Image: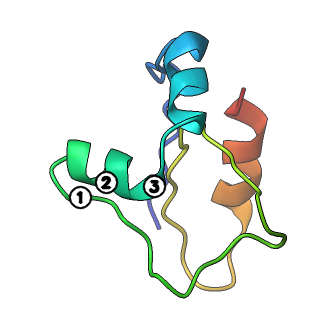
Amino acid sequence: MYGAIVRNVVRPPLQQLDALVRLGVATIHEAMGRRGLMASRLRPIYPGAAIAGSAVPISVAPGDNSMVNAAIEVCQ
């Protein structure tokens, strides 16, 4: 299996992420051209929860958590 770690991920400024917290998911989804919306069955664990941040996508084989561990190391 091939694995690659990208260490120089370009992330948006924190001010932009702070602004996203105040917007609704539907607004952000539509502004992004209706891409990237997660399944509607996914819900916050408690009412009123909100989060915004940059993602660190990974690709892993079933049962192999090595890239999960690597991604955690490079997260900010």
Q: Which residue lies at the image location 69% right of the left edge and 31% below the top edge?
A: 74
x and y percent of residue 73 in the render? 77, 36
Secondary structure of the residue carrying tag 1 is loop
Classify residue 47 as left or right of residue 11.
right
* Tag 3 near tag 2, CB within 8 Å: yes
Quarter holding residue 64: bottom right
* Tag 1 near tag 2, CB within 8 Å: yes
Residue type, label 2: His
Residue that carries the numbered disc 1 in the rendered image = 35
Q: Which residue lies at the image location 59% right of the left edge and 80% below the top edge?
A: 42
x and y percent of residue 3 in the render? 49, 53
Q: Nearer the viewer, mark 3 or mark 1?
A: 3
Residue that carries the numbered disc 2 in the rendered image = 29
3 or 1: tag closer to the N-terminus: 3
Residue that carries the numbered disc 3 in the rendered image = 25
From the viewer's side, name the closer residue of 17 and 22: 22
Residue type, label 3: Val
